[in-house]
């Protein structure tokens, strides 16, 4: 897989390789757990009016790179909108990070375990 997530003590690291790194113009994101304000698994729809700043956007296909919508900065890397993890962030370079992963619900669970500031029951 061209995206991987590593869980460190204080942050999660999302690594991009191959064409995914090239298309999204990024090799990795280091996101402190304290910046995560919400996590969702499964589905995401980018508004058609979102502005692509840097990266790649294929209609009904791959989205990768930096996007802007209603003043919010997004980092996207996915082919399948139904296999993503969506992170709402605060105090970070992006307001939202959307990444396709193999097991979105498992990744969401792993993130919630490392984010005691989030209410686990709220996200089930």
Image: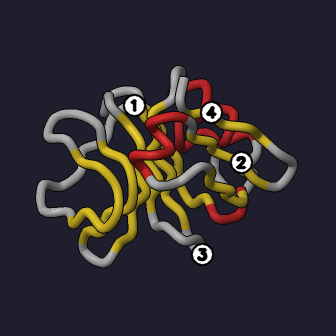
Question: Mark 1: which secondary structure?
Answer: loop
| Residue behind mark 2 | 12
As displayed, is residue 51 above or below residue 58?
below
Q: CA distance from mark 3 to mark 2?
A: 15 Å
User: Which residue is at the front of the view, 54 or 113?
Assistant: 54
SS of the residue under disc 2: strand
Question: Residue 110, how many percent across, how many down?
Answer: 69, 34
Which numbered mark, 4 or 1, is in the foreground of this view?
A: 4
Quadrant where the N terminus is found in the figure: top right
Tell me which numbered mark, 3 or 1, is placed earlier along the sequence: 1
Instruction: From the image, tell me which residue sits under label 3.
Output: 91
Identify the residue shown where x is 51% and y is 29%: 101
Labels 4 and 1: the sequence-earlier one? 4
Q: Label 4 to label 2, Cα distance in Å?
A: 10 Å
- 40 left or right of 90? left
Q: Earlier in the sequence, mark 3 or mark 2?
A: 2
Mark 3 vs mark 4, foreground winner is 4
3 or 4: tag closer to the N-terminus = 4
Would you say the residues marked 3 and 4 are in contact, meaning their CB atoms lie under 8 Å apart?
A: no
* Residue under the image location 37 percent in, 47 percent down: 64
Viewer-proximal residue among 16 and 123: 16
Q: Residues within 10 Å of mark 4 (few under 14, many from 20)?
A: some
**Residue 36, position as x, y percentages in the image:** 61, 58
Per the image, the residue denoted by label 4 is 4
Q: Callout 1: few (<14), some (14-19), or many (20+) C-alpha neighbours within 10 Å?
A: some
- Secondary structure under badge 4? strand
Residue 31, horizontal then vertical, whole percent: 66, 57
Q: What residue is shown with label 1?
A: 42
Q: Give me the C-alpha separation between circle 4 and circle 1.
A: 17 Å
Q: CA distance from mark 1 to mark 2?
A: 19 Å
């Amino acid at each position: 897989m061209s995206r991987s997530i590593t869980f460190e003590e204080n942050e999660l690291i999302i690594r991009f390789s191959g064409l995914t790194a090239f298309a999204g113009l990024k090799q990795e994101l280091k996101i402190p757990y304290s910046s995560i304000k919400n996590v969702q698994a499964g589905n995401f729809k980018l508004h058609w009016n979102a502005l692509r700043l840097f990266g790649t956007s294929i209609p009904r296909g791959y989205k990768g790179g930096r996007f802007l919508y209603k003043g919010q900065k997004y980092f996207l890397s996915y082919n399948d909108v139904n296999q993503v993890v969506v992170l709402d962030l605060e105090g970070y370079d992006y307001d939202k990070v959307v990444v396709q992963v193999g097991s979105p619900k498992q990744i969401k669970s792993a993130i919630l375990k490392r984010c005691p500031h989030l209410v686990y029951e709220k996200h089930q």
